[in-house]
Image (cartoon, helix red, strand yellow):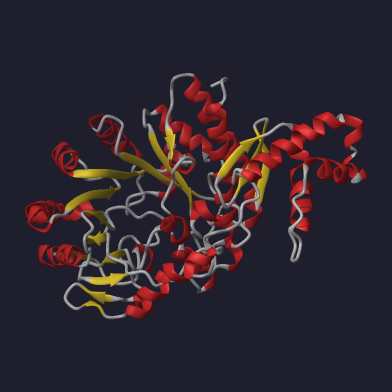
Amino acid sequence: MIHQYQNNGYNIVLDVNSGSVHVVDDLVYCILPVVEKILAEDAGPGKETVTGKETVVNRLLCRKELDLEKHYTREQLLEAVEEILELKEAGQLFTDDIYEKYIADFGKRDTVVKALCLHIAHDCNLACKYCFAEEGEYHGRRALMSFEVGKAALDFLIANSGSRVNLEVDFFGGEPLMNWEVVKQLVEYGRSVEKAHNKRFRFTLTTNGVLLNDEIMEFVNREMGNIVMSIDGRKEVNDRMRPHRGGQGSYEEIVPKFRRAAKSRGQQDYYVRGTYTRYNPDFAEDVKHLADLGFEQISVEPVVAPPEEDYALREEDVPVLIAEYDKLALEYLNRRKEGKAFHFFHFMIDLEGGPCVAKRLSGCGSGNEYLAVTPWGDFYPCHQFVGNEDFLMGNVEDGITRPDIREMFQNCNVYTKDKCRDCFAKFYCSGGCAANAYQFHGNINDVYDLGCQLQRKRVECAIMIKAALADAII
């Protein structure tokens, strides 16, 4: 299966199953889908014919709708077809899907827990309008995690991580800085037991920045591998959706803190992370604004919300949003050319290596390799399922008491989702977010359709950027 598209003057062809990307001329771009059909016809059951370039060209010339003779010589056609056949022979074009045969055994694999999302605080000092956590309450009660519960969670992670050395722990909320003393205690505990268990914790923190200060930042810079700082972009955009409980905006108080934080980390190992809504479909302007503030690691993502919410994205918004990603991709390239480069999370694709096969097929590992822990120690597949007791998997004292939920998530992959089978982006998004699929369809083996359209566009932009960066122009 191939996917071909045109973007920023490039004719781009992605061979989906091999991951090979080709930038081709107009002739190859025109004839590729027809050549694919010709080769498929000749490779049918009981057929062993090796189709040569002369045969392919003759059959191309029979396709009068292509009108090839008017624009190209036979020699040009032979050269183009030869190039295509060489790429096919090299395993870089029209390749077979080798992963579906692998998926049955993949679902039976033994998994270990690699990461925890510790809900250190089910409370928040902001009242963000799109918050899926209901201002930190998660459909339940306000609470702060005790050191004892957090310690038990880290002990569970160590005990259930097998031989894996590197473990991930994200301090999440609500707002985790509302329980900062326990965060520090848990980091110190984790460091104290690493050597004895041959483990290495990578701690991260997600914060709205209201309580961020120099003392906290010094600790974060010393102990944490990443910090995610929430801001939606321009002042009017941020303050509309991320106000305090009294209605006053948060932009003015967090921007200076975030700028100092980014600088203190050498512009590495952090993200400023925003959410765009129906109120700011021109979200590229928010990305540009964050870049103008000096941030070099930026993520601005679409809101996921029920359609009845006035800020929710709708199907009719998609063409505008797709055009905005194209606009952002060009801005991204222009700023690199001008020496003002920034990184945009959704444009960062590794075409040489990329995620391992397991990640390409199954995604984030929620529900088996990754778990969320509530302040009172309950396990859920991820932070977006917290509060839905149909997905309560166990707790820090008893461990996993619902292995059926773990198995359901373990067996969720791009081949259990019908909408993913023929999607060119499936090995980049790994089937998308299970929580979003459940929210809109009540089934983790479905997909969030609007999100899929945006994800496909982001992948196209990311590949175009790679092509442009490989070009001598940039």
Count of picture labels: 0
Tell whether 240 sits left or right of 381: right
Spot occupied by residue 323 in the image (x, y as percentages of width and height): 63, 40
Instruction: Please tell me which residue is depicted at 35% across the width and 55% down the height of the picture.
Output: 127
Instruction: Say if residue 279 shows up in the picture.
Output: yes
- In depth, the one of 356 and 330 nearer the eye is 356
Say which quarter of the image contains residue 218.
top left
Spot occupied by residue 219 in the image (x, y as percentages of width and height): 14, 41
Instruction: Say if residue 130 shows up in the picture.
Output: no
Instruction: Please tell me which residue is depicted at 52% across the width and 41% down the height of the picture.
Output: 283
User: Above or below — where is 147 with respect to 61?
Assistant: below
Tell whether 184 sits left or right of 73: left
Spot occupied by residue 6 in the image (x, y as percentages of width and height): 68, 38
Instruction: Please tell me which residue is depicted at 76% across the width and 38% down the height of the picture.
Output: 81
Say which quarter of the image contains residue 149.
bottom left
- In depth, the one of 153 and 119 nearer the eye is 153
- In depth, the one of 107 and 82 nearer the eye is 82
Spot occupied by residue 324 in the image (x, y as percentages of width and height): 59, 40
User: Above or below — where is 376 with respect to 325?
Assistant: below
Tell whether 233 sits left or right of 123: right
Instruction: Please tell me which residue is depicted at 27% across the width and 44% down the height of the picture.
Output: 226
